[in-house]
Image (tube, coloured by chain):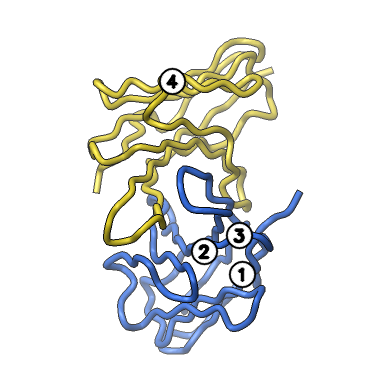
Chain colours: A yellow, B blue
């Protein structure tokens, strides 16, 4: 099942610079996209989301961009901080008649971000 | 900030035994989920639960699995007869309403089957 793909398993960035994490999807039914951050021994923590009716959503240092025609989204972190070092998961959901509004998430495989001091 | 809590943090069980994983979702949330992550693999959806019934389940969620909301606060996942391949991190999540809202996750239960 490769409906959501994160092709970069890891990314290293210098503190203060921009981190760009990428995600591609194949399922045209997806209409809501989320980014989660995960530290070891913790669960995924919600960061930011975007609906398919938008192409950009911003929250502080975090901005998510959605390119529907390319089925691509990206997360920008500016400026990057050492505390941002974690695994970042892209996830997507769709509204299926069979499941009502349950909207289960389909996850990518994650990108390990390391922010170097 | 309200959070989803899961117990135990680590469960070790003999193959063939029953195991119950427990979750307390965020109190005003209406949608509940279980996911699992086998070591080195993606986080996978297992089941969603709304209005006291299963709303969707994946093909992983076979007859060995069941979920229950026994009271107003707990949400449990039971595996009737565990197999070695059930070893994984199990995450509970909850969501406040329908629509495009984020799910909030607990810290997971690490299930180890011997």
Find residue A94 and report its horizontal and vertical position in percent.
33, 46
Relative to A19, A74 lies left or right = left
- For the residue carrying disc 3, how many other residues have a C-alpha within 10 Å: few (<14), some (14-19), or many (20+)? some
Find residue B91 and report its horizontal and vertical position in percent.
53, 60
Q: Which residue is mark 3?
A: B29
Badge 1 and badge 2 in a common chain:
yes
Dot 3 falls on which chain?
A: B
Q: Which residue is mark 4?
A: A65
Ranked by sequence position, the earlier of labels 1 and 2 is: 1
- For the residue carrying disc 1, how many other residues have a C-alpha within 10 Å: few (<14), some (14-19), or many (20+)? many
Mark seen at residue B32: 2
| Disc 1 + disc 4, Cβ < 8 Å | no
Residue ID at (38%, 67%): B55
Mark seen at residue A68: none
Which one is in front, A103 or B112?
A103
Mark seen at residue B23: 1
The kind of secondary structure element at disc 4 is strand
Relative to B35, B24 lies left or right = right
Q: Nearer the viewer, mark 1 or mark 2?
A: 2
Q: CA distance from mark 3 to mark 1?
A: 13 Å
Badge 1 and badge 4 in a common chain:
no
| Disc 2 + disc 3, Cβ < 8 Å | yes
Relative to A55, A42 lies left or right = right
| Above-or-below relation of B8 to A89 | below
The kind of secondary structure element at disc 1 is strand
Badge 2 and badge 3 in a common chain:
yes
Find residue A11 and report its horizontal and vertical position in percent.
48, 24
Ranked by sequence position, the earlier of labels 3 and 1 is: 1
Q: CA distance from mark 4 to mark 2?
A: 28 Å
């Amino acid at each position: 099942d490769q409906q959501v793909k994160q092709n970069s398993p890891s990314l290293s960035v210098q503190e203060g610079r921009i981190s760009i994490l990428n995600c591609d999807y194949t399922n045209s039914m997806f209409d809501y996209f989320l980014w989660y951050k995960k530290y070891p021994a913790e669960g995924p923590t919600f960061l930011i989301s975007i609906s398919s009716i938008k192409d950009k959503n911003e929250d502080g240092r975090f901005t998510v961009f959605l390119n529907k025609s390319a089925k691509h989204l990206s997360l920008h972190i500016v400026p990057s901080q050492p505390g941002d070092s974690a695994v970042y998961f892209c996830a997507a959901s769709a509204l299926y008649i069979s499941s009502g509004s349950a909207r289960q998430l389909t996850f990518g495989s994650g990108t390990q971000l390391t922010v170097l001091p | 900030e309200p959070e989803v809590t899961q117990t135990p943090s680590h469960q070790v069980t003999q193959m063939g035994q029953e195991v119950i994983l427990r979750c307390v979702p965020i109190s005003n949330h209406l949608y509940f989920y279980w996911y699992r992550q086998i070591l080195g693999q993606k986080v996978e959806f297992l089941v969603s639960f709304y209005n006291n019934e299963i709303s969707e389940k994946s093909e992983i969620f076979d007859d060995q699995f069941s979920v229950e909301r026994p009271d107003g606060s707990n949400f449990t996942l039971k595996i009737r007869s565990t197999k070695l391949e059930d070893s994984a991190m199990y995450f509970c999540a909850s969501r406040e309403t329908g629509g495009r809202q984020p799910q909030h996750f607990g810290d997971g239960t690490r299930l180890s089957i011997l």
